[in-house]
Image (cartoon, grey):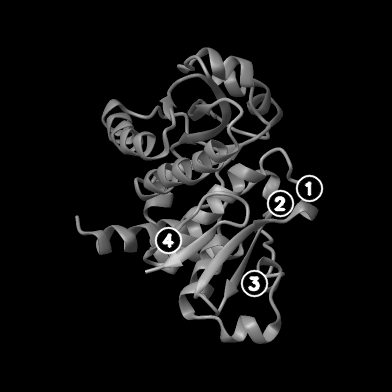
Amino acid sequence: MGGMAEHNQLIDAVNIRTAIRSFDDEPIDDDTARQLDMTLAPLNLLGDLHLQLVRNRPQVFAEANASGHLRNAANYLAVVGPKNDAEAKERAGFYAERAVLAATLRGLGTLWVAGSWDRAEAARHCHIRNGEELYLAVVIGHPEHHVERLAKSYEELAEFQRTHRPTKSFEQFTAGMSDEAREAAPAWFKAGVEAAMKAPSAMNRQPVTFTYNADDDTAAAHIDPSAGDEHWALNDLGIAKLHFQIGAGQGQWAWGDGGLFLHK
């Protein structure tokens, strides 16, 4: 598969991914699990992370399933990385969201969870090496009524993504820019921001803003301290950066709050 074909598929995944809270009770089969593990292996190498797929552990979500907040949640991506490492938390958001988009293209449903799970129970079922910690989890599985869902067109799924939840506006996502600067910004920057607007974030707080600097043709990503997302902001920064990069096309981020994106 060429780079361009893969990139177009990732844009499709960005445009149809939504948070799924209700799952069918059909397990993730061995073949699908193998394919997901094959996706995780290079992401772990690139990100120096320890992302893992854990199947058939409904007890991790027992309380949320019982309360109706989740339904039939039983599998998760364990987002594991180095302890006390801010950059690793950002990389975890970036690379685990890449796995989320791969799962989306396979017709699976996902949900990043900060609460709604038993962290201690989850930690018992994944491998956490010395010097590592479990940051967060992503619930994964077949969405409820997934057979009917698979019959929906790309356009129907993209329209649902666009309208299913409130989102901050383009202006809020580019809060550090004037109207003139927004207007003058290149198409790649606008496309990047629009893709980032579709990114998941803890408690849907969307704590990341973007600016464009015409002098050196770079973008920057910033954590918005007023979003009240101090616990998960670095993870959300990584997720938003991935979505921006996919939307913008070719280019690369520097890690960190205020990190620059060089468009290629």
What's under tag 4, amino acid-wise? Ile
What's under tag 2, amino acid-wise? Arg
- Left or right: residue 45 compared with residue 232: left
Per the image, label 1 sits on a secondary structure element best described as loop
- Dot 1 or dot 3, earlier in sequence: 3
The answer for how far apart the CA atoms under marks 1 and 4 are is 26 Å
Classify 53 as above or below 88: above
> Which disc is residue 246 wearing?
4
Per the image, label 2 sits on a secondary structure element best described as loop
For mark 1, what is the residue? 228
Query: Residue 85, position in %: x, y?
Result: 58, 32
For mark 3, what is the residue? 170
Query: Which quadrant: the C terminus?
Result: bottom left
Whether residue 150 is visible: yes
Residue ranking furthest to the left? 1
Whether label 1 touches label 2, CB < 8 Å: yes
Whether label 2 touches label 4, CB < 8 Å: no
Whether label 1 touches label 3, CB < 8 Å: no
- Dot 1 or dot 4, earlier in sequence: 1
What's under tag 1, amino acid-wise? Gly
Query: Residue 217, position in %: x, y?
Result: 49, 75
Image quadrant assignment for residue 146: top left
Q: What residue is shown at x 39% (from left), y 67% (from top)?
A: 249
- Dot 4 or dot 3, earlier in sequence: 3
- Dot 2 or dot 4, earlier in sequence: 2
- Left or right: residue 129 compared with residue 198: left
Q: What residue is shown at x 58% (from left), y 20% (from top)?
A: 60
Q: What residue is shown at x 56% (from left), y 56% (from top)?
A: 259
For mark 2, what is the residue? 205
